[in-house]
C-alpha cells in the first residue's frame, strides 16, 4: 500500500523505515511543515516523495500522523475531512485531547489512536532508527470507536513490527503515561537545570559525569516543542504526579537534614521495590 | 604482588578481576564481614583466599578498601595501625570524612584516597564485572599527602585499567559528586517512590514502562546501606543541591499550572544546554 507520513521526524521517520522494511508500504509520501526536513528525509531514503497534505491523502491507503500533539489535535480533523476509505492513525504521547477533538467527526471511525512506547532524546529525520519499535509496547486507545478494518490494519502493522499491543482508553493512557513517561522528562529537565545552575565548573561535570548521571539526565536533551505540548495536554495528571514527586523529594530532604538514618534507609528500601516491576 | 580487597562486593570484586586481568595481582586475599560474600567471591574466582584483616595486611603489598564509606572511615585507621611499608587505597564515593579521619595518623602517607567513577545499581560479589573501569574517570584526592611510591602504585593501577586520572582535593570532590552523582540517586529513589505511591496498577507500569522511565529510575535499585552512608557523609553539599532541585521542579509546576508556555519552553531550552556537556 501507499502510506503518507505527516511529520518526518524521529517517530515518523522510524515508522517509515519499519513500514518499508516489513514490506507494508510500497511507497511512502512525506508531508512536513519543514522543507529542510522533507529534503533530509528524501536524502536519507525515509520517504519516496513529498507533497501537499491533500495530494498525499488522495494517493494513500494509510495516513500516519507523527507531529507534536497540539499540532496533531488541529491537523487530524482536517485530514478526516478529506478521507474516504483511508485509515488515519496517530502515534502521539497523549490521547485524550486528540480523541476529543474528533469525537463527533463523521469520519471518526476511520481513525485509530495509538502510542508506540519508544523514543529517544533526539529529534528530526536524522534521529529516525531502523528496528526502533521491535519488542516495545504500543497502546491502542478507544478501539471500539474505530472501524474493524481500520483497527485490523493498525494491529497488523504493529504485529509486523513485533510490538506488544495494549488496549487502554484515552483517560487511562494519559494517567499512566504521566507516571511512566512524562514525569521522567520533567525530573530530567529539572536535574539538568539544577546542575547547570549550581555547577559553574563545566569541566568538573565533564570530567566526573558518570553513567548514573548520564542516564538520569539524558532525557533533558529532548525536544522542547514536543514536550511542551505533551505537558499542556496532560496538565492535570502531570501536576498530580509532580506534587507527589516534590513531596517524596522533601522526605529525603527532611531525613537527611535530621540525620534520621532509619527513615532514610526505609525510603530507599521502599524505592528498591521498583525492582519487582523493572527488570 | 599480593593484594587484599576489603569488601568483596560490586566495586571490590570488579577491582579484584581487573587487578588479576592486568597481571598486577598474583594473588587476591578477600576480607569481608559477610561469610556468604566471601564464599561467593571464592566460587566466582574473584579472590584466591580469605582471612582475617591482620593476616591479610601482613601478607599483602596493597590493601584496597571497598566498603561503604562510613565503615571505611572506621576501618581505614585500623588498617593503617598495622601497616609498615604496604600501600592502602580506598575507592569510596565521598572523600572528606575519610581523609579527615586519618589526617593525623602516623601512617597517613601510606594511604591514597581515590574514587573510580563507575558503579551499577547492583551490589554483592555477583555484581562484579570484568572491564568495569576501562575508559572511565577516577579521582585521586589530596595527592600531596601520600608518599610518592604509594601514589605511583595507585596511578599505575588506574593507568593499567585505562582510566583517566583526575586530581581533586577532598572538599572539591565531595561538592562535585553531590551534583554529578549523589543527586541523581536521590531523584531516582524519589521517582520510584512517587510511582509506587501513585500507581497502584502495577500491570500498567510493567506494560508501559519505556526506556525513558527505566533510565531515570534505574538507580532506585541501588543499595540503601551504601547510599545512606554517602548521603550522611556528604550531607551539606547534598542538601544544597536538593534544595536547588526542588526549586527547579517547582518552576515546572508553576508554569504548567499557569499554562505559561513561553516560560516552560524556556526552562526546557535551558536544560537542553546539558548537551554541550554530555555527548
Image (cartoon, coloured by chain):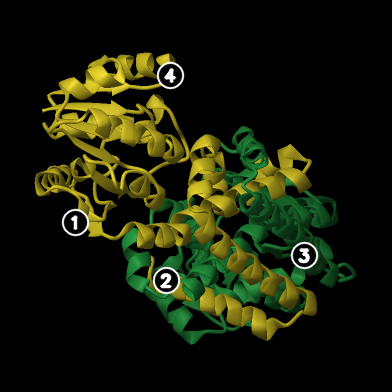
Chain colours: A yellow, B green
Where residue B89 appears, x then y in whole percent? 69, 62
Q: Residue at x 18, y 21 (%)?
A: A58
Front tag of 2 and 1: 1
Given this view, does label 3 or label 4 mark the residue nearer the observer?
Answer: 4
Q: Which numbered disc flags the more N-terminal residue, 4 or 1? A: 4
Q: Pick the quarter of the image with the C terminus of chain B.
A: top right
Cα gap from disc 3 to disc 2, whole angstroms: 27 Å
Q: Residue at x 66, y 83 (%)?
A: A263
Q: Position of residue A218 (x, y in %)?
A: 53, 45
Calculate the distance from the C-alpha at mark 4 to the C-alpha at mark 1: 35 Å
Camera-side residue: B76 or A33? Answer: A33
Question: What secondary structure is marked by label 1?
Answer: helix
Residue B225 figure quarter: bottom right
Q: Residue B239 carries which label?
A: 3
The crowd level at tag 4 (other Cα within 10 Å; few <14, some 14-19, many 20+) is few
Q: Is mark 2 on a helix, strand or loop?
A: helix
Would you name the residue on which mark 2 appears?
Answer: A275
Q: Would you say the residues marked 2 and 4 are in contact, meaning their CB atoms lie under 8 Å apart?
A: no
Residue position for label 1: A144
Q: In this view, does A91 lie above or below B225?
A: above
Q: Is the residue under label 1 in contact with that under label 2 (CB below 8 Å)?
A: no
Q: Say whether residue A15 is left or right of residue B96.
A: left
Location of residue A165 in the rendering, given as x and y in whole percent from the top left corner: 22, 55
Circle nearer the viewer, 2 or 4 = 4
Q: Give the camera-side residue of B150 and A62.
A: A62
The label on residue A179 is none
Query: Relative to A32, is B135 above or below?
Result: below
Picture quadrant of residue B90: bottom right
Tag 3 subunit: B
- How crowded pointer 2 is (Cα within 10 Å; few <14, some 14-19, many 20+) is rated as some
Instruction: Identify the residue position indicated by label 4 in the image.
Output: A34
Of all chains, the one bearing label 4 is A
Amino acid at each position: 500500500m501507499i502510506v503518507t507520513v505527516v511529520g518526518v521526524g524521529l517517530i515518523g521517520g522510524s515508522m517509515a523505515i519499519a513500514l518499508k522494511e516489513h514490506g507494508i508500504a510500497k511507497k511512502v509520501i512525506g508531508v512536513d511543515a519543514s522543507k529542510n526536513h522533507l529534503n533530509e528525509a528524501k536524502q536519507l531514503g525515509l520517504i519516496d516523495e513529498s507533497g501537499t497534505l491533500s495530494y498525499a491523502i488522495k494517493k494513500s491507503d494509510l495516513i500516519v500522523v507523527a507531529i507534536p500533539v497540539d499540532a496533531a489535535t488541529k491537523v487530524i480533523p482536517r485530514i478526516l475531512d478529506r478521507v474516504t476509505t483511508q485509515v488515519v492513525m496517530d502515534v502521539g504521547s497523549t490521547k485524550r485531547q486528540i480523541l476529543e477533538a474528533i469525537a463527533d467527526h463523521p469520519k471518526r471511525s476511520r481513525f485509530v489512536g495509538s502510542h508506540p512506547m519508544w523514543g529517544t532524546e533526539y529529534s528530526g529525520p536524522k534521529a529516525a532508527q531502523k528496528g526502533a519499535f521491535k519488542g516495545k509496547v504500543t497502546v491502542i486507545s478507544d478501539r471500539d470507536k474505530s472501524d474493524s478494518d481500520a483497527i485490523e490494519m493498525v494491529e497488523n502493522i504493529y504485529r509486523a513490527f513485533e510490538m506488544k499491543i495494549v488496549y487502554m482508553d484515552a483517560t487511562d493512557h494519559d494517567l499512566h503515561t504521566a507516571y511512566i513517561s512524562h514525569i521522567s522528562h520533567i525530573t530530567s529537565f529539572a536535574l539538568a537545570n539544577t546542575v547547570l545552575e549550581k555547577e559553574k565548573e563545566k569541566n568538573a561535570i565533564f570530567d566526573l559525569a558518570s553513567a548514573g548521571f548520564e542516564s538520569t539526565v539524558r532525557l533533558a536533551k529532548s525536544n522542547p516543542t514536543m514536550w511542551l505540548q505533551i505537558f499542556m495536554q496532560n496538565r492535570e495528571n502531570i501536576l498530580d504526579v509532580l506534587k507527589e514527586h516534590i513531596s517524596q523529594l522533601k522526605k529525603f530532604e527532611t531525613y537527611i537534614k535530621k540525620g534520621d538514618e532509619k527513615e532514610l534507609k526505609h525510603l530507599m528500601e521502599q524505592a528498591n521495590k521498583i525492582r519487582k516491576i523493572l527488570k
